[in-house]
Each structure stands twice: as structure tokens, then as C-alpha cells.
Image: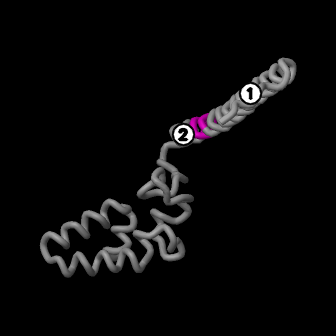
Amino acid sequence: MGIVGRLDDLGMPAWIALMVLAFIFFWPAGLVILTYLIWSGRMACWKHQYAGPWQRGAGSCGPGARWFGNGRHGSSGNRAFDEYRAETLKRLEEEQREFKEFLDRLRVAKDKAEFDEFLAERRRRSQEGPQPQPQT
């Protein structure tokens, strides 16, 4: 395995460390590494076709995106831990889905309350009769 493969296995922090060290010791080498990282797509979210294994399938490139790993963990070598991790992730995904549904219901209830308040205010104004318009 070459140095690129080893750095890909270590992930983005290894590439960044190599680039920083190269800039410190010999800045043209750092520039070459930076150019390579951008050209190969290892530093850019819009070039997933050239991305290393640490970036493929990462989903998004927003603030919450992982630097390495794609979120799908391989076997740790311990079946009990792998089963526990799978159950925990499944439970957390279910809790996340339930929480999103709760927030949706909360938003609907809030909207309904605001709309009911608007209708009540409108009925109250119509029962009081027309208000005189202020003159300028």
C-alpha cells in the first residue's frame, strides 16, 4: 500500500497534518499537497467521484459532516459489541423519528392555536361593530 492509501485509511486529519508539516518545512511541497487534495476531491464535497474511502457516502458536507468514516461502521471483531451498537443505533434512529413527529405535532398545535386566536379576535371585532377610522 502506498503513502496515499495509508493516508486515506487514516482519514482527513492525516492529510491535513501532512499538508501543515509540508508548509512548515518546505512551503512549495505544502502547496503541491494542497493542490493534489483539491484536485483529487479529498478536500471538496462536490467531487465525490474521486473521494477516498473515508469520504465516500458521507451524505452531506455541512457542518455536521464527519471528517472520516462514512457513518457505516464495519465489524469491530466483537459480535456482542456489534449487535449492541446496531441495536443502539436503531433505537436512536427511532427516537429521532419520534422526536421529529412530536415537533411536527407541536408546530401544528401552535399554528392551530394562533389561527383560533385570530378567528376569535376577528369575531370579537365584527360583533363590536365598525370602528371609526382615524382622521389625519
> In which quadrant of the rendered image does the N terminus lie?
bottom left
Q: Which mark is residue 109?
A: 1
Q: Which mark is residue 85?
A: 2
The residue sitting at 14% across, 69% down in the picture is: 24
The quadrant holding residue 95 is: top right
Position of residue 74 relative to residue 36, above or below, is above
Q: Report helix, strand or loop for mark 1.
A: helix
In depth, the one of 19 and 76 nearer the eye is 19
Residue 89 rendering spot, x and y as whole percentages? 58, 40
How much space separates mark 1 and mark 2, taking CA atoms?
36 Å
Type of amino acid at the residue the image marks with label 2? Arg
Position of residue 88 relative to residue 45, above or below, is above
Would you call the spot at circle 2 few (<14 residues within 10 Å), some (14-19), or many (20 or more)?
few
Residue 28 rendering spot, x and y as whole percentages? 19, 81
Would you call the spot at circle 1 few (<14 residues within 10 Å), some (14-19), or many (20 or more)?
few
The quadrant holding residue 108 is: top right
Main SS category, magenta section: helix
In magenta, the rendered stretch is 87-92
Give the left or right position of residue 68, taking residue 103 as reference.
left
The residue sitting at 56% across, 62% down in the picture is: 57
Position of residue 136 relative to residue 62, above or below, is above
Looking at marks 1 and 2 on the same chain, the residue that comes earlier in the sequence is marked by: 2
Question: Is residue 38 shown to the viewer in this render?
Answer: yes
Q: Report the residue that reaches farthest toward the left.
A: 25
